[in-house]
Amino acid sequence: MSILVLTSDTLIGTPATGNLEYNGQFFGTDSNASRAQLQRIVRATAVSASGTAITFSGIPAWAERITIMLSGISLSGTANLQIQIGSGSALTSGYVGQTWLGNTNNASYTSGFLLSATSLATYVYYGHATLTNITSNSWVFSAAAGVTTAGAAVTGGGSNTTLGGALDRVIITTSNGTDTFDAGTVNIIYEG
């Protein structure tokens, strides 16, 4: 049995084969010349949904995958639930993709990733959406959620045009920008 002892938070030199060392993150090694940083999964603070938008900012540049979690989310009107990403501010154009609700409604989008093809004020969403870095500052999107009050499920996927810099925020908002959240909890996790 091996025991890992962290004696310093500063990495000095190249770690020996098979060691883990700490420098704000964990590192795994397979040779004296090769060291890979192992990023942990970070969960943000859950937010009670209110207002017209919920922004999670301060996402580090090393994040490669972001999961948005929705529990009991409801809107005040008929706008669709939308997810935008950004680097310094929200990207409001350049998205491409499709979303689907049940077996009757499909929708294209360009101003953000839509979670549902259609919506009513009575819809309540439970599920998650995932953003994955495909290359440089471009991201792909996929989502799956249940709409309990509609007896339906939603699914969708898409991508965005390249951001002007590293993604540092995710915004959960509405497609019309005026309907408000009136119930539920939202949170994200990000990982390298």
Image (cartoon, rainbow, N blue to C red):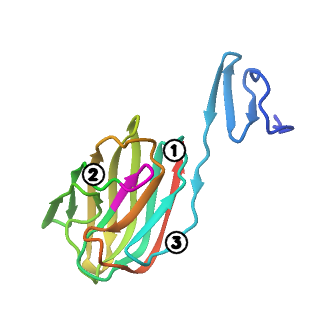
Indicate the quadrant containing the N terminus: top left, top right, bottom left or bottom right.
Answer: top right
**Magenta highlight range:** 83-90
Q: Nearer the viewer, mark 1 or mark 2?
A: 1
Q: How far is the residue under mark 1 from the one under mark 2? A: 20 Å
Q: How far is the residue under mark 3 from the one under mark 1? A: 20 Å
Q: What amino acid type should be assigned to the residue bearing mark 2?
A: Gly
Which residue corresponds to mark 3? 47
Describe residue 102's horizontal placement relative to residue 136 as left or right.
left
Q: How many marks?
A: 3
Q: How far is the residue under mark 2 from the one under mark 3? A: 24 Å
Please tell me which residue is depicted at 26% across the width and 70% down the height of the picture.
80
Residue 190 in picture, x, y percent from top left: 52, 51
Mark 3 crowdedness (10 Å alpha carbons): few <14, some 14-19, many ≥20:
some
Q: What amino acid type should be assigned to the residue bearing mark 1?
A: Ala
Which residue corresponds to mark 1? 63
- Would you place residue 20 above or below residue 189 in this image? above
Element at label 1: loop
- Would you place residue 150 above or below residue 167 in this image? below
Q: Quadrant of residue 36?
A: top right
Which residue corresponds to mark 2? 157
Residue 132 falls inside the magenta stretch: no
Mark 2 crowdedness (10 Å alpha carbons): few <14, some 14-19, many ≥20:
many
Q: Nearer the viewer, mark 2 or mark 3?
A: 3
- Would you place residue 82 above or below residue 162 in this image? below
Residue 100 in picture, x, y percent from top left: 20, 61
Element at label 3: strand
Please tell me which residue is depicted at 22% across the width and 58% down the height of the picture.
99
Residue 30 in picture, x, y percent from top left: 66, 21
Nearer to the camera, 42 or 128:
42
Give the mark, 1 or 2, whose residue is nearer the N terminus.
1
Q: What amino acid type should be assigned to the residue bearing mark 3?
A: Val
Q: Are marks 1 and 2 in contact (CB under 8 Å)?
A: no
